[in-house]
Amino acid sequence: MNNLTEGKSDDTRVKQCFCDICGKSFNYNGHLTIHRRIHTGEKPFHCDICGKSFYRSGDVTRHKFTHTGEKPYHCGICGKSFSQRSTLTQHKSVHTGEKPYRCEICGKSFSKRSELTNHKRTHTGEKPYHCDICGNSFSQRSSLTQHKYVHTGEKAYHCEICGKSFSKRSHLTRHKYTHTGEKACHCEICGKSFSIRSNLTRHKYTHTGEKPYHCDIRGKSFCRSNDVTRHKRAHTGEKPYHCDICGKSFSKRKYLLILTHKKLLHSDVPFIF
């Protein structure tokens, strides 16, 4: 049992299991077995509908809800339903205002562990996700996924109400509110309501004056992460938006589509905004 050590304290027998690859410890051998699959890449549980593979049996069970549409977890406050228990737990913080995950660097609190993880990278500058096409780096995996659509032009997120497609999940989410009119996120300072939590977060900066996103080149601060991304292009010269008609490149999408280039120079060619 080279990966299992045992210790005794009074009458309580404690077992700790250590990963021989990274040293992380677990109370149960089964948890260690699941953890090791992160290192080995083993995914022994398969979806019999689409063939996708997973580390844990529970993950494939939850995944199947994306095929069946089943949402067995219901919010007792507003009645909204979810396919995963963890998503319901996170949703309830909208009603309770609870933010149990706290940044030990600046003290800011979050309702989701993933939000805290992403936030910490604003302090460390870590960008672990890299685009294999252009080399750009991102602090969040979702940002990398969405960035790649700049290269491929893919619009993978579809509205089941009207059929419109989007390159970002967040754009689809915002779009759906044009159908429902829902504004579930409320500012506790002024009472203003928003359909998207990120809009509420940005709105609160008008009360606090906080600018959490910083340019690591000149130090300028911004309220929104995409503002600092666009600002950095002034330093790097990056122009990720390309005209598919003549090949010219632009630093901002609006310059390509709306304000000047395609509108003025290619007005005779139909294109989609």
Image (cartoon, grey):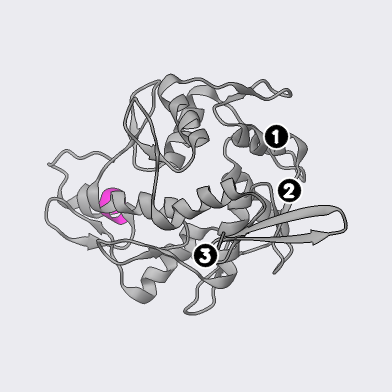
Q: Residue at x 43, y 68 (%)?
A: 231
The image shows residue 204 at horizontal and vertical percentages of: 68, 51
Label 3 vs 2, first from the N-terminus: 3
* Residue lying at the far right of the rendered structure: 10
Q: Residues within 10 Å of mark 2 (few under 14, many from 20)?
A: some
Quadrant of res 172: top left
Element under disc 3: loop
The image shows residue 154 at horizontal and vertical percentages of: 26, 42
Q: Is residue 191 above or below residue 62?
A: below
Query: Where does the C terminus fall, quadrant-wise?
Result: top left
Label 1 vs 3, first from the N-terminus: 3
Query: Where does the N terminus fall, quadrant-wise?
Result: bottom right
- Residue type beneath disc 2: Lys
Label at residue 196 = none
**Which residue bears the numbered disc 2?**
99
- Residue type beneath disc 1: Lys
Q: Is residue 86 left or right of residue 141?
A: right
Element under disc 1: helix
**Which residue bears the numbered disc 1?**
92
Label at residue 20 = 3
Quadrant of res 243: bottom left
Q: Is residue 200 left or right of residue 225?
A: right
